[in-house]
């Protein structure tokens, strides 16, 4: 007898892996379909888990982000029960420095400090101890820093390796019975009170499906029929992986500033410098001279002590971006059994595990569980919010 799943998840990045893990761990029958596209954002990403230190996302981002970061504790505990250690997820609390390198930025630091302190007092996660540091004090924590006129330090910020966390959740899902299929989902349709799709010539059937195809989600949605519009587009990010032989960098804090670039570290001597935000790249996962120069110039401007590092690798990710900078979460307009979780842009590793779990519950017809926040308002993230712009 042909297998019938409760839910089929399309896309095996951080969001899809989280959805599949959540579903399988709850006892649902689930198939994860992944075609492993070159340029998958998760495979390239190094995530900063500290939304309370951000100052420029849309206002609707923060309630979702605070819950998403709080959910990491639940997720990591579940993975630990399934045998996945922190080493195998790449998640570690290392702290964060928000540095000022110009007089104008130094003048803005006290304003940002008050904002972070207010968020901390209101319960925003992953902030911890907040301190204003001098440039010399900041360099003691991140020795490669150059001229720094001051910094805000937050002790509880964390970082995560996208590939490692994705793979840990996929292994966890498989342990709980999930089927993982390598291939491309085609001919997606609702039929007989459920969903059917074709993968590698085989028809898969389920009660519902979650579209978590990252930057490719819009093209997949178009196969559902005329009028289905998910305006997700690829934003290329070029991320440099450097090595500092003989230097133990694993406990150096994350470094950010008044720009979109960042520095973070992994064991034993790896420093990650990112990232470009190329919204006109299309589906082109190439390393470019201009992109590498941009990321390298900014890294060396902030941390000239990295000049002697080995440029070991450049990872390219095509982030799924949306027109208003917010993800698309929930049921696809005009569908009863088809759901979407995509459009996280540069915040995929921060928001993705939570988004996948949240939409997994929706696909099972369940209201939000206590570990996700029972009063989650998904209105700002409704996939149909762009319908009037068509």
Image (tube, rainbow, N blue to C red):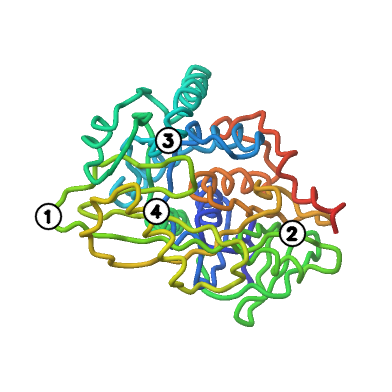
Q: Which of the image's four quarters has the N terminus? A: bottom right
Q: Is residue 277 left or right of residue 145?
A: right
Dot 1 crowding, Cα within 10 Å, few <14, some 14–19, many 20+: few
Tag 1 secondary structure: loop
Number of marks present in the image shown: 4
Q: Which of the image's four quarters has the C terminus? A: bottom right
Tell me where residue 361 appears, x and y as whole percent: 63, 44
Determine which of the numbered discs, if any, sits on residue 246 in the image. Answer: 1
Residue indicated by mark 3: 73
Tag 2 secondary structure: loop
Going from N to C along the chain, the mark reached first, 4 or 2, is 2
Whether pointer 1 and pointer 3 mark residues with C-beta atoms closer than 8 Å, the reply is: no
Question: Up-down: is 359 above or below 296?
Answer: above
Between marks 3 and 2, how big is the CA–CA gap?
31 Å
Dot 4 crowding, Cα within 10 Å, few <14, some 14–19, many 20+: some
Q: Is residue 262 left or right of residue 41?
A: left
Between marks 2 and 1, how big is the CA–CA gap?
48 Å
Between marks 4 and 2, how big is the CA–CA gap?
33 Å
Determine which of the numbered discs, if any, sits on residue 298 in the image. Answer: 4
Tell me where residue 295 appears, x and y as whole percent: 41, 59
Going from N to C along the chain, the mark reached first, 3 or 4, is 3
> Of the residues tagged 3 and 4, which is closer to the observer?
4
Question: Up-down: is 130 above or below 38?
Answer: above
Tag 3 secondary structure: helix
Residue indicated by mark 2: 230
> Of the residues tagged 2 and 1, which is closer to the observer?
1
Residue in the image at 79% along x and 48% along y? 385
Q: Is residue 205 visible?
A: yes
Tell me where residue 224 appears, x and y as whole percent: 78, 67
Q: Is residue 213 visible?
A: no
Dot 3 crowding, Cα within 10 Å, few <14, some 14–19, many 20+: few
């Amino acid at each position: 007898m042909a297998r019938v799943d409760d839910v089929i998840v399309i896309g095996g990045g951080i969001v899809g892996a989280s959805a599949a893990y959540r579903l399988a761990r709850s006892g649902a029958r689930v198939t994860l379909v992944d075609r492993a596209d070159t340029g998958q954002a998760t495979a390239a990403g190094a995530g900063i888990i500290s939304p309370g230190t951000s100052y420029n996302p849309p206002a609707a981002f923060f309630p979702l982000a605070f819950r998403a970061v709080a959910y990491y504790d639940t997720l990591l505990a579940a993975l630990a029960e399934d045998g996945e250690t922190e080493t195998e997820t790449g998640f570690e609390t290392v702290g964060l420095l928000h540095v000022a390198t110009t007089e104008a930025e130094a003048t803005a630091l006290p304003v940002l400090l008050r904002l972070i302190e207010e968020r901390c007092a209101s319960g925003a996660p992953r902030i911890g101890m907040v301190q204003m540091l001098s440039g010399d004090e900041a360099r003691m924590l991140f020795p490669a820093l150059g001229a720094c006129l001051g910094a805000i330090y937050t002790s509880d910020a964390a970082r995560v390796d996208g590939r490692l966390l994705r793979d840990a959740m996929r292994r966890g899902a498989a342990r709980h019975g999930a089927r993982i299929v390598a291939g491309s989902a085609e001919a997606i349709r609702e039929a007989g009170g459920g969903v059917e799709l074709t993968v590698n010539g085989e028809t898969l059937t389920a009660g519902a499906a979650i579209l978590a195809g990252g930057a490719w989600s819009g093209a997949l949605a178009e196969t559902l029929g005329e009028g289905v519009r998910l305006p997700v587009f690829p934003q290329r990010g070029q991320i440099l992986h450097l090595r500092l032989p003989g230097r133990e960098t694993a406990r150096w804090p994350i470094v950010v500033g008044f720009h979109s670039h960042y520095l973070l570290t992994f064991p034993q001597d790896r420093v990650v410098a990112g990232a470009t935000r190329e919204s006109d790249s299309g589906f082109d996962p190439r390393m470019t001279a201009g992109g590498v120069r941009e990321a390298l110039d900014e890294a060396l401007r902030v941390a000239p002590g990295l000049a002697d590092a080995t440029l070991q690798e450049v990872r390219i990710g095509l982030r799924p971006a949306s027109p208003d900078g917010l993800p698309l979460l929930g049921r696809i307009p005009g569908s009863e059994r088809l759901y979407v979780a995509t459009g996280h842009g540069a915040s995929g590793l921060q928001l993705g595990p939570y988004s996948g779990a949240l939409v997994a519950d929706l696909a099972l017809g369940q209201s939000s569980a206590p570990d996700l926040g029972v009063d989650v308002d998904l209105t700002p993230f409704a996939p149909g919010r762009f319908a009037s712009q068509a």
